[in-house]
Image: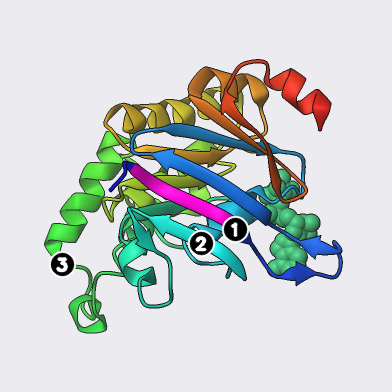
Amino acid sequence: MNDFVIECHNLETAYTTSLNRPILNGINCQIKQGEFVVLLGLNGAGKSTLLRSLIGLVPHTKGEIKINGVTMTPRTLVQIRRHVGMIFQGGGLIRQLSAIDNVLCGRLGVRTTWQTLFGFPQRDRNLAMDLLAQLGLKEQAYQKTSQLSGGQQQRVAIARALIQSPQILLADEPITGLDVVACQQVMETLSELHQQGMTIVTVLHDLGIAAKYGQRAIVLEAGRIVYDGLCENLQAQFAKC
Ligand SMILES: Nc1ncnc2c1ncn2[C@@H]1O[C@H](COP(=O)(O)OP(=O)(O)OP(=O)(O)O)[C@@H](O)[C@H]1O
């Protein structure tokens, strides 16, 4: 038994004719509990695909993914997804729903249709409200997410991922399109979660922010890892790409 919570061994996705190669092409990496990892790379390098493959949204044709020591297969996917929260690119919120209802959507995977037929149980609603309060959004809980700022929306997306109490949080470009203040709020939120022991893997494009918050950088190029190490001299690593 090792202390890796994420392991990718020679991970390969299906061949893509438009690229003349698989999107992910022999990915090997191991991430320990409590690490803060930033995934970097130019557009189209495969960052989102790697993140999505870690929750089984992109099938792999070769290699293996293990989450908490459990090999990802169709049979283990439900079990694996309980440990992994995902913040999708752009937040993926339902704009016409309130912030609290969006957060409650994160409980759909653990509640049956019968349990939510007349609304979510009070316990879930209290939990959603606590999370929104922790993220500074108590006042906005009943506002439609379309009326919230970009930074507030991104924090709702974080609350939705957190309501399933994940051990690992994956975030795909959580600060893209945000102003500097909102950017900092979102990154500070991720940083606090990391300090509480959560494993964070996030796609970023800003090398300065990556260096400020990340402990470790993984740089992808054309579906392969070309750098895996400290968040120092990232500029130099990119110059090699
Ligand atoms: N479902 C798909 N079918 C075919 N090609 C795809 C699919 N999804 C992604 N791709 C291609 O795979 C490559 C990697 O895409 P991906 O979104 O993982 O890159 P990325 O590094 O996250 O890029 P960005 O920084 O622009 O978000 C791109 O060339 C993209 O066009």
Image position, residue 135 (x, y; %)? 33, 35
Res. 177 visible in picture? no
The segment highlighted magenta reads 4-10
Name the residue tied to disc 2. 64
Q: Amino acid at mark 1?
A: Leu
CA–CA distance in space, label 3 to label 1: 40 Å
Q: Quadrant of the C terminus?
A: top right
Residue drawn where x is 24% and y is 79% of the image: 112
Res. 12 visible in picture? yes
Corner quadrant of residue 207: top right
Q: Earlier in the sequence, mark 3 or mark 2?
A: 2
Looking at the magenta stretch, what is its main secondary structure?
Answer: strand
Q: Earlier in the sequence, mark 1 or mark 2?
A: 1
Corner quadrant of residue 60: bottom right
Relative to residue 228, is residue 52 depicted above or below? Answer: below
Magenta run includes residue 49: no
Badge 1: residue crowd in 10 Å (few <14, some 14–19, many ≥20):
many
Magenta run includes residue 8: yes
Query: 68 or 41, which lies in front?
Result: 68
Name the residue tied to disc 3. 121
Q: Amino acid at mark 2?
A: Glu
CA–CA distance in space, label 3 to label 2: 38 Å
> Helix or strand or loop: what does disc 3 sit on?
loop
Question: Mark 1 near mark 2, Cβ–Cβ under 8 Å?
Answer: yes
Q: Earlier in the sequence, mark 3 or mark 1?
A: 1
> Helix or strand or loop: what does disc 2 sit on?
strand
| Ligand 1: quadrant of the figure | bottom right
* Image side of residue 84 versus residue 63, left or right: left
Image position, residue 121 (x, y; %)? 15, 67
Image position, residue 117 (x, y; %)? 23, 81
Callout count: 3
Name the residue tied to disc 1. 11
